[in-house]
Image: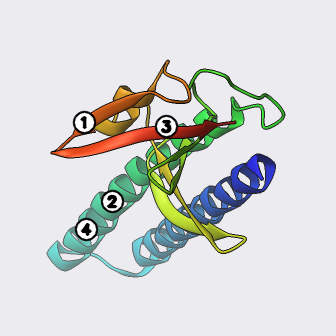
Amino acid sequence: MKHQILNRYKQLLQDRIDVFQDMILGLTIDAQNDAKGSAGDKHETALSMMHIEQEKLSYKLKEVLVQKNILDKIDSSQVHKKIALGSIVQANGMTLFISTALPKISIENKNIFALSPQSPLGSKLMGNQVGFEFDMNGKEYTIESVF
C-alpha cells in the first residue's frame, strides 16, 4: 500500500509541475508576441503584469519541486518500527503518510492524509512507535500501527 500511496502523490505533484511549467511557457510566449507588436505605457504595463505572474508561478513551481524532492527520498519498501519520513501511521482510525503536506487522497476506500514531519501532529509522531499515546488539541491519539 505504501508504494501505491507514494506513487499517487508523486503523480499528483508531477501533474502540478506540468501545469505550472505550461503556464510559465504560455506567459513567456505571450510576452514575446506582445513585445513584437506594441509600444507605449499600456504595453509596458502588460509586460510588467506578465512578468509578475511568471514570478508567482515560478515560486509555486519551486515549492512543488521541493515537495517532489522530499517524496523522491522515500523508499517505499522500507518498513519502520519507529515513525520516520515515509512511515504510514494508523492512529485513531486515520491513515497518515509522513512526507510533506499534501491533499488528502483515497486508496482502496481509505482516506490518506499526507503530513509534514514539521507539522504539529507530525512532530508529535516522529520517533514514536505503536502504542504511543498523546494529547493534541484536547483529543487523545493512540498509534495503532506503523509501516
Pick the front one: 14 or 143: 143
State the residue position of label 2: 51
Pick the front one: 105 or 91: 91
Which label is found at residue 118? none
Residue 110 versus residue 133 in the image, above or below: below
Q: Can residue 99 be seen here?
A: no
Mark 4 belongs to which amino acid? Answer: Met
Determine the secondary structure under disc 3. strand
Mark 2 belongs to which amino acid? Answer: His
State the residue position of label 4: 49
Determine the secondary structure under disc 4. helix
Work out how far the residue at label 3 is from the one at label 4, CA to CA, in angstroms. 50 Å
Q: Nearer the viewer, mark 4 or mark 1?
A: 1
Counting residues from the N terminus, which is met first, the one under dot 2 or under dot 1? 2
**Would residue 117 appear left or right of 129 to someone viewing this image?**
left
Determine the secondary structure under disc 1. strand
Determine the secondary structure under disc 2. helix
State the residue position of label 1: 135
Q: Residues within 10 Å of mark 4 (few under 14, many from 20)?
A: few
Work out how far the residue at label 3 is from the one at label 1, CA to CA, in angstroms. 12 Å
**Would residue 24 appear left or right of 4 to someone viewing this image?**
left
